[in-house]
Amino acid sequence: MNVIEINNLTKYYGKSRGIINVSFNISEGEIFGFIGPNGAGKSTTIRLLLALIYPTKGNAKIFGKDCIKYGPEIRQEIGYLPSEVFYYDKMKVIDLLKYSASFYKKDCTERLHELAEIMELDLNKRIDDLSYGNKKKVGIVQGLLHKPKLIILDEPTSGLDPLMQQKFFDLIRLENQNGATVLFSSHILGEVQKLCTRVAIIKEGQIITVEDIKTLQENNYKKIKVKGKYITEEHFNMDGVSNLHKNEDAVNFFYKGNINQVLKIISSNLISDVLIEEPTLEEIFIHYYR
């Protein structure tokens, strides 16, 4: 079952491009990555899913229901953490979270305190006394206190220190193990690589590819490093080779194609070492953006 279904979703702000013909599905129980630099269209897509803005054309469904028509009903089961959080400064954290909890048809008190303890959040402080990182913790607790079936995270870790980021990732994994589906939007590729099983890459408002992270790495360029006293760039002047450069006694390059062709060249030369590895998600991402 697909929790999210997006079909040719398009949004223009006047004549300015938001997103164009965005389509992808997210299965129940999945942690799905949505990556692209700032301005690529990630937040626009998320705001359309939440019916905070309306599409120019196309449609999206959550839990099989149209996002616009059934927006208030759907949002009862969604936890959302925006990239920027803004609150009423003079409220205490506990009052703000109790107010948020009042919108849901369930008692969130125990869960609220449990999450505050995990995130090391002082419930008795006023909002305007909090650092940006602590305001982000408020947003995390606010987004999860009703045990949502779908969690939508838009650049969620900005402002969190590394230790708190790890706690947050552990919390999201636990929510996922308990049945929540997660849409994780970020431009920090290492986070997506650690957390997600599939990823959509968006560029200038359009989806470039949707792939399993493992498949994306395996079917993409190999990173190759060949060490040898007499090895030069000319040995690997062939189709499929890119980013070729020599560093002291080693030649480094990316290769896409029949790996046996490269191995044939390597084996016919005197070498001292060879390293063939999968590229990181960041290196794949940079390739797509080129």
Image: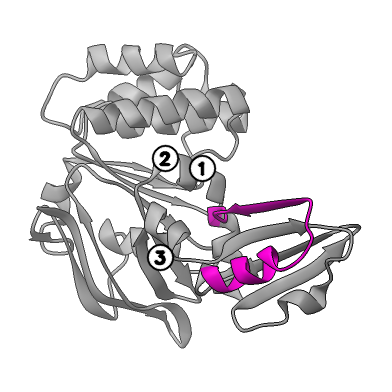
Q: Quadrant of residue 271?
A: bottom right
Residue 225 forms part of the magenta stretch: no
| Residue at which label 2 appears | 195
Would you say 124 lies left or right of 145 here? Answer: right
| Residue at which label 3 appears | 44
Would you say 56 lies left or right of 124 here? Answer: left
Using the numbered discs, state the Cα–Cα distance from disc 2 to disc 1 in whole angstroms: 6 Å
Using the numbered discs, state the Cα–Cα distance from disc 2 to disc 3 in whole angstroms: 22 Å
Magenta stretch bounds: 260-281
Q: Nearer the viewer, residue 27 or 6?
A: 27
| Residue at which label 1 appears | 191
Residue appearing at x 27%, y 66% in the figure: 24
Q: Is residue 287 above or below residue 140?
A: below
Dot 3: few (<14), some (14–19), or many (≥20) neighbours within 10 Å?
many
Dot 1: few (<14), some (14–19), or many (≥20) neighbours within 10 Å?
some
Q: Nearer the viewer, residue 137 or 267?
A: 267
Q: Nearer the viewer, mark 2 or mark 3?
A: 2
The spot of residue 98 in percent (x, y) is: 29, 22
Residue appearing at x 31%, y 18% in the figure: 112
| Label number found at residue 130 | none
The spot of residue 284 in percent (x, y) is: 55, 63
Q: Is residue 283 above or below residue 108?
A: below
Residue 277 forms part of the magenta stretch: yes
Q: Nearer the viewer, mark 3 or mark 1?
A: 1
Disc 2 marks a residue whose amino acid type is Leu
Residue 130 in view (yes/no):
no
Q: Earlier in the sequence, mark 2 or mark 3?
A: 3
Residue appearing at x 26%, y 33% in the figure: 176
The answer to whether marks 2 and 1 mark residues whose Cβ atoms lie closer than 8 Å is yes
Disc 3 marks a residue whose amino acid type is Thr
Secondary element type, mark 1 = helix
